[in-house]
Image: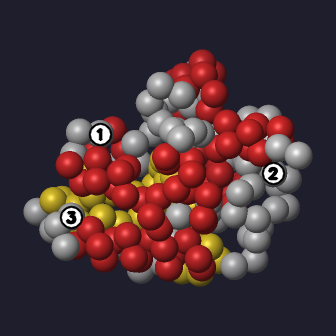
């Protein structure tokens, strides 16, 4: 498994790409969410550490196959039009969720679950953004890097990259910028 794999609008995956190491999560949000086994282990540790601060986090979305991505992309396209859809949801094959290495987290407060932009100003979210690199995750679509990632700010979307996460965090990079730096090294 290549934990550094870059999937974006310029680097799509084929329809047939299905990751090998998927496992089911114990998400309270929804049944049958699958992610890569290492990503599950890492997220479980993050989730446990969060409990120390009484932060209740979980996985809202994990692995999504090509056909499912096609369905949700087409739905948004139909509802909101191309220019809206294209910066907010990946076209089929261009979603990191197809790698099994990406997840969207949600936050529980008083048994109510908050997702996506609802969590933007939560202290839990801030804590996750500042600490997830210790478990191998990066915030994949940060604010201010929209011209590089080609996505709107997504405070809920984490990507597992393993041990390069700290370097990416310390240098305030996106995965695109990291790959670019790496390609210039001899
Ligand atoms: Zn996502």
Q: In this view of the protein, which residue sits in the foreground, 60 or 161?
A: 161
Q: If you read the primary sequence from the N terminus, does the residue marked by circle 2 or circle 1 appear first?
A: 2
Give the residue pinned by disc 3.
55
Which residue is most to the right?
186
Secondary structure, mark 2, is: loop
Q: Position of residue 77 (x, y in %)?
A: 60, 29
Tag 2 residue:
13
The answer to whether 178 appears left or right of 76 in the picture is right
Question: Which residue sits at x=75%, y=77%?
Answer: 20
Quadrant in which residue 101 is drawn: bottom right
CA gap, disc 2 to disc 3?
Answer: 35 Å
Give the image quarter of residue 66.
Answer: bottom right
Q: Is residue 131 above or below residue 93?
A: below
Q: Quadrant of the N terminus?
A: bottom right
Residue that lies at the very extreme toward the left in this rendered image: 110
**Mark 1: which secondary structure?**
loop
Q: Residue at x 37, y 50 (%)?
A: 129
> 172 or 156, which lies in front?
172
The residue carrying mark 2 has its beta carbon less than 8 Å from ligand 1: no
Front label number (2 vs 1) = 1
Q: CA distance from mark 3 to mark 1?
A: 15 Å
In the shown orientation, is residue 35 left or right of residue 57? right
- Residue 120 has which mark? 1
């Amino acid at each position: 498994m290549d934990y550094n794999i870059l999937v974006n609008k310029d680097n799509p995956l084929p329809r047939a790409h299905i990751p090998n190491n998927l496992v089911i999560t114990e998400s309270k949000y929804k049944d049958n969410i699958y992610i890569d086994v290492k990503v599950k282990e890492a997220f479980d540790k993050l989730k446990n550490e969060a409990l120390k601060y009484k932060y209740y986090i979980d996985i809202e979305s994990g692995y999504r196959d090509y056909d499912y991505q096609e369905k949700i992309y087409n739905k948004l396209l139909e509802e909101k039009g191309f220019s809206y859809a294209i910066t907010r949801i990946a076209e089929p094959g261009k979603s990191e969720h197809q790698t099994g290495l990406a997840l969207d987290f949600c936050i529980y407060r008083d048994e109510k679950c908050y997702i996506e932009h609802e969590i933007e100003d939560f202290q839990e979210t801030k804590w996750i953004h500042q600490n997830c690199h210790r478990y191998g995750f990066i915030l994949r679509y940060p604010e201010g890097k929209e011209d590089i990632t080609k996505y709107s700010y997504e405070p809920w979307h984490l990507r597992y990259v393993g041990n390069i996460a700290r370097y990416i965090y310390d240098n305030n990079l996106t995965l695109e910028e990291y790959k670019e730096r790496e390609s210039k090294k001899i």
